[in-house]
Image (cartoon, helix red, strand yellow):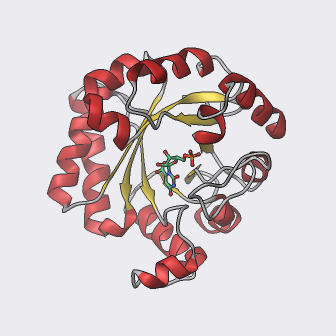
Amino acid sequence: MTDGLESVFIALDTSDPLGARHLVRTLGKGPRTAGFKIGKEFFTAHGPVGTREVTDGYPLFLDLKFHDIPNTVAGAIRSSLQLRPAIVNVHASGGAAMMRAAAQAADEAATAFDAPRPWVIAVTVLTSLDDSDLDQVGQAGPAREQVLRLARLAQDCGLDGVVCSPRELADLRRHCGPDFRLVVPGIRPDWADSGDQKRTMTPGEAISAGADRLVIGRPVTAAKDPLAALQRLASDLA
Ligand SMILES: O=C(O)c1cc(=O)[nH]c(=O)n1[C@@H]1O[C@H](COP(=O)(O)O)[C@@H](O)[C@H]1O
């Protein structure tokens, strides 16, 4: 994975392998494509074999958001390294021991499989939640403070970075420093519907605020012409 202009992971949120394959062919060499994100929908249907086939050697963000006891998460991280992902993730709310176990498992498995060590990052507060949603589930808000609290914990536990919404980027950059990886969904160009995303910004705003990688799905993948949508989005970044 290179730093710099290739800054977007495209989310392949589909269970249709042919559709996913078509998106990879169309968007793989598109402007700003850093790689592809495989999440629960595709992985549950097609597993590691389907994932390997569909991503076809492009950098993989394996987004399975592990959240379990430390021993179970460590095992899941070890297994996931067989796919040689560029990025894997866990939920920060799984706690410090779980995050430490995830980081250690990634170190050990990278050595054991002679695989590159992926970024191990923690999801803070899902971008589909706002302050009142946090209140409902008994998490201390506002979202901005909860994201910062979890990001600091993830950094203390040796994780490489976090998933956050674009709205927290400036704060996190300031508190966590330039080397802490900030991977950012909740990206909505002003021409796209927000859908179920609540804490959003445009791609240009997110990059200016300090994102390392953007994660973009439906504004591109659900467009009539996904490549044209990606090109339009890239021009917002330029
Ligand atoms: O971990 C993620 O990637 C993630 C975390 C989060 O807080 N919010 C979030 O939307 N995501 C993922 O980012 C993608 C966003 O897709 P779109 O909303 O279609 O652009 C989806 O695949 C989500 O699963």
Q: Quadrant of the C terminus?
A: top right
Residue 88 seen anywhere in this rendered image of the structure: yes
Using the image, determine if residue 136 lies above or below residue 11: below
Residue 110 seen anywhere in this rendered image of the structure: no
Using the image, determine if residue 131 lies above or below residue 50: below
* Residue 135: percent from left, percent from top: 48, 84
Q: Residue pushed farthest front?
A: 224
* Residue 75: percent from left, percent from top: 17, 46
Using the image, determine if residue 19 lies above or below residue 132: above
Residue at image position (49%, 69%) is 152
* Residue 129: percent from left, percent from top: 53, 69
Residue at image position (21%, 36%) is 79
State which quadrant residue 44 falls in. Answer: top left
* Residue 115: percent from left, percent from top: 32, 27
Using the image, determine if residue 201 lies above or below residue 120: below
Looking at the image, how many numbered discs can be counted on the residues? 0
Residue at image position (47%, 22%) is 19
> Looking at the image, which is closer to me, 63 or 153?
63
Q: Quadrant of the N terminus?
A: top right
**Position of residue 97 in the picture relative to residue 185 (left or right):** left
**Position of residue 2 in the picture relative to residue 139 (left or right):** right
**Position of residue 176 in the picture relative to residue 204 (left or right):** left
Residue at image position (54%, 81%) is 132
**Position of residue 26 in the picture relative to residue 238 (left or right):** left
